[in-house]
Image (cartoon, helix red, strand yellow):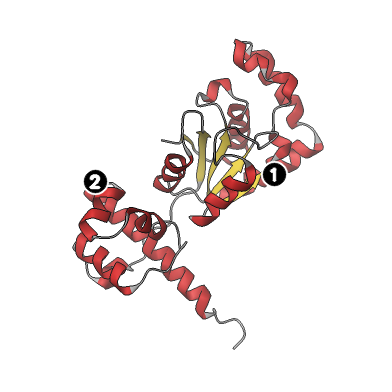
Amino acid sequence: MAGLPTTSSRDHARARVLAQRVRTLREARGWTRAQLAKEAGIHARTLVRVESEGAIQPGFFTIGALAEALDVSLDDLFRQSEPATPGLWSAGYEGRDIDSFVASLLDSQIEVVADVRLTPISRKPGFSKTRLGLALAEVGIEYTHLRGLGNPKDNRAPFWDGRLVAGRARFRSVLRSDEGQSDLDRLAEHARQSRVAVLCFEKDEERCHRQVVLETIHKRTAAPVRPLA
């Protein structure tokens, strides 16, 4: 019948519920993924994928092992949790590797990564656009590159040498362009509906133009802004 969900869509929804529930129960116990994986007798990478918002549909053995380790019934394991609150996270990948970065995104239940680098290329393995997008897709996180929110090359020095007022003023003029306004609209829409990590390189948000992006979107949407742990 038209309008009824397909088997695949129902399975995906069920996997998303399981992902959220396992994460909630694990965190309530104060366990890391490694601890839960050990208790359940499953591979840590399997658990990462289970918790990745429906990235996989685990088999009965895995589900049963998780229920036993968490001391809950199978019915309780599939009880839907309260939806995560939308918002913004400030994400700099300086000093991180791709695995720890993705783990941090999962811990914060990030649903969308908005890349605000002008040119999404990196010497750090895994952080260039294509590889990053693939790594995020593998765990069920959407990736979008917002080029209109990138900082021009000739405006980067002020953020590095302490001329922050001048650098931010120049970047705000970039945001007033048609492309900048269009991408701000896209990011604002994401922030109203999802948990969004705004990505650039610098660990310190104060030395990065994304601080201006986050401030602007917060004013538009009132979405809370948090640092990515």
The type of residue carrying mark 1 is Asp
Q: Residue at x 60, y 30 (%)?
A: 210
In this figure, which residue is indicated by the disc labeled 1?
185
- Label 2 Cα crowd, 10 Å radius (few <14 / some 14-19 / many 20+): few
The type of residue carrying mark 2 is Gly
Secondary structure state at the residue bearing disc 1: helix
Secondary structure state at the residue bearing disc 2: loop
Query: Above or below — where is 20 with respect to 64?
Result: above
Q: Residue at x 37, y 59 (%)?
A: 46
Q: Looking at the picture, how far across and down is residue 129, in whole percent? A: 63, 43
Q: Which mark is residue 66?
A: none
Tell me, yes or no, if residue 191 can be seen here.
Answer: no
* Residue closer to the observer: 213 or 207: 207
* Picture quarter with the N terminus: bottom right
Query: Above or below — where is 20 with respect to 214?
Result: below
Left or right: 7 in relation to 63: right
Q: Looking at the picture, how far across and down is residue 29, in whole percent? A: 22, 50
Q: Residue at x 33, y 53 (%)?
A: 44
Q: Looking at the picture, how far across and down is residue 48, in whole percent? A: 38, 54
Alpha-carbon span between mark 1 and mark 2? 38 Å
Q: Which mark is residue 30?
A: 2
* Residue closer to the observer: 196 or 225: 196
Left or right: 164 in relation to 38: right
Badge 1 or badge 2: first in the primary sequence: 2
Instruction: Tell me the mark number nearer the camera, choosing from 1 and 2.
Output: 2
Instruction: Specify the quadrant of the image occupied by residue 212.
Output: top right
Q: Residue furthest right?
A: 178
* Labelled pair 1, 2 in contact (Cβ < 8 Å): no
